[in-house]
């Protein structure tokens, strides 16, 4: 099937959408989660692969020196690529070769080297969209007339901001044809555990055509619908392309670490990108930047505790949780009163999730016979697949495994990364949380659970901890 094409919202002249239009948009966007990716073009590659030149330092008019790895091809279309928080990796060389083989020139922008910044998400606080816009100007000054700006994860957000800077500085300039994004991370800050995230304002301030590749086995997939709605509201025409059975960053991993679907997708990468770029070039290019959304931005106040301690959460009732377990029996959180419950969202394709399973089992054993329960909510995988996963690793879970087939529970609990875990008191109020893998039987966690467990009064009545 073809990728889904989302028309930009006509809000500037016609006003906001009415209820019927909103319902139609909701129905249209809901199809995103059941449709497969585009069929491949069958034409042969258009250029021989040649090695990149040595990393080049480009002296921009701003005085900034940008480090770039250039892969020359036919000289007609240039793809500028911004990496994720991990920077340029060994796998980018193969990525570049496949793009180059399709006749597309590629500049891999080494942001971390340019800014002498360590890898990690905080580096993007230093990266300036103005300098990426200057790099666009540098390319235009050297004769490029068809440029696509692309990026992966956090690099995609930087690409959007740089593109807007370029549009503002160069009205009616038609050189920048669109945006090519892999699993874009456009969330504003890191949302607090259990709280709804807000998208960056740039998502509504982008009107260039965009083509998004979104791996299915990636938590960003869960929030594709609201992201697309934001882009649509800003006036961006979007192609949305789901890669079934694929994890984020599949094109950068060693081949022996790939899933079967990822092996297939990796071989198709160059053709996928050429097809996407051809679609972007065929779209009309807006003459001006989108209007400022004038929306406030919000910073997340979640905690990431690295010493093995759980982050305290505002005490409030936990969302509903009613899912079937590994035996096909329905589990309802409301039926398990007076128990301290650890709710853990996970998937078998998530390495950190897998690493913490043994410590979860030890935690369950530690509290055996006491009112404590672990509920592991698997996101989007079949019982057969998870059963094979446990069998291959000789794991017999001593905790409940629930199946969130349509990822609805993950959305209700505002899960933006996995593993994410919530610790509930006996009244099933949210009390603590943790985002990331943890050694669950560490003394700090055990002490926290002990504080929440009901204790017995002198008269023999059970009282839950406050």
Image (spheres, helix red, strand yellow):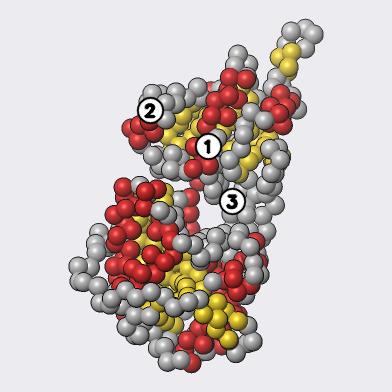
Residue at the image position 54 percent from the left and 64 percent from the top: 87
Q: Which-is-in-front pick, marks 2 and 3?
A: 2
Residue of label 3: 196
- Whether residue 408 sits left or right of residue 200 in the image: it is left
Callout 1 secondary element: helix
Front one among 124 and 411? 124
Which label number is shown at residue 391? 2
**Residue 19 x %, y %:** 44, 60
Percent x, y for residue 332?
A: 50, 27
Residue 453, visible in the rendered structure: yes
Query: Dividing the image into 4 quarters, which one contains the N terminus?
Result: bottom left
SS class, disc 2: helix
Q: Is residue 372 above or below residue 264?
A: above
What is the number of the mark on residue 355?
1
Query: Is residue 324 in view?
Result: no
Q: CA distance from mark 2 to mark 3?
A: 35 Å
Q: Are marks 3 and 1 in contact (CB under 8 Å)?
A: no
**In this view, which residue lies farthest toward the top?**
459
Give the total of numbered labels: 3
The mark nearer the N terminus, 2 or 3, is: 3
Residue 119 found in image quarter: bottom right
Instruction: Choose the circle earlier in sequence order: 3 or 1.
Output: 3
Callout 3 environment at 10 Å: few (<14), some (14 to 19), or many (20+)? Answer: some
């Amino acid at each position: 099937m073809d990728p889904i094409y989302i028309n930009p919202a006509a809000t500037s002249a016609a006003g906001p959408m009415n209820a019927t239009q909103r319902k139609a948009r909701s129905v249209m966007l809901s199809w995103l989660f059941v449709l497969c990716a585009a069929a491949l073009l069958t034409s042969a590659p258009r250029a021989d692969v040649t090695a990149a030149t040595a990393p080049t330092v480009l002296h921009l008019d701003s005085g900034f020196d940008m480090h770039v790895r250039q892969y020359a091809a036919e000289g007609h279309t240039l793809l500028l690529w911004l990496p994720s928080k991990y920077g340029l990796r060994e796998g980018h060389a193969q990525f570049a070769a496949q793009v180059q083989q399709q006749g597309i020139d590629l500049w891999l922008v080494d942001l971390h080297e340019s800014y002498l910044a360590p890898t990690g998400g905080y580096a993007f606080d230093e990266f300036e969209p103005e300098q990426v816009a200057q790099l666009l100007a540098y390319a235009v000054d050297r004769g490029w007339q068809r440029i696509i700006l692309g990026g992966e994860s956090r690099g995609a957000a930087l690409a959007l901001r740089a593109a807007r800077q370029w549009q503002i500085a160069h009205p009616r300039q038609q050189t920048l044809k669109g945006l090519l994004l892999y699993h874009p991370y456009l969330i504003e800050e890191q949302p607090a555990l259990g709280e709804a995230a807000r998208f960056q304002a740039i998502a509504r301030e982008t009107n260039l055509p965009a083509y998004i590749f979104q791996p299915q086995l990636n938590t960003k997939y869960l929030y594709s619908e609201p992201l697309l709605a934001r882009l649509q509201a800003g006036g961006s025409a979007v192609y949305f392309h789901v890669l079934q059975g694929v994890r984020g960053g599949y094109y950068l991993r060693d081949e022996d670490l790939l899933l079967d679907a990822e092996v297939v997708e990796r071989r198709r990468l160059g053709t996928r990108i050429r097809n996407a770029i051809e679609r972007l070039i065929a779209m009309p290019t807006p003459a001006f930047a989108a209007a400022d959304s004038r929306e406030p931005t919000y910073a997340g106040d979640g905690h990431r505790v690295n010493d093995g301690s759980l982050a305290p959460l505002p005490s409030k009732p936990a969302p509903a949780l009613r899912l079937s377990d590994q035996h096909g029996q329905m589990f309802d959180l409301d039926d398990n009163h007076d128990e301290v419950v650890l709710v853990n969202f996970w998937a078998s394709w998530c390495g950190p999730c897998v690493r913490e399973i043994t410590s979860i089992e030890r935690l369950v054993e530690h509290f055996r016979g006491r009112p404590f329960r672990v509920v592991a909510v698997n996101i989007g995988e079949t019982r057969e697949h998870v059963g094979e996963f446990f069998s291959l690793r000789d794991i017999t879970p001593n905790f409940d495994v629930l199946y969130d087939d349509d990822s609805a529970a993950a959305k209700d609990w505002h899960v933006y990364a996995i593993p994410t875990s919530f610790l509930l008191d006996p009244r099933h109020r949210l009390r603590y949380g943790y985002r990331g893998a943890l050694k669950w039987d560490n003394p700090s966690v055990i002490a926290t659970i002990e504080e929440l467990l009901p204790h017995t009064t002198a008269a023999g009545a059970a009282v839950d901890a406050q």
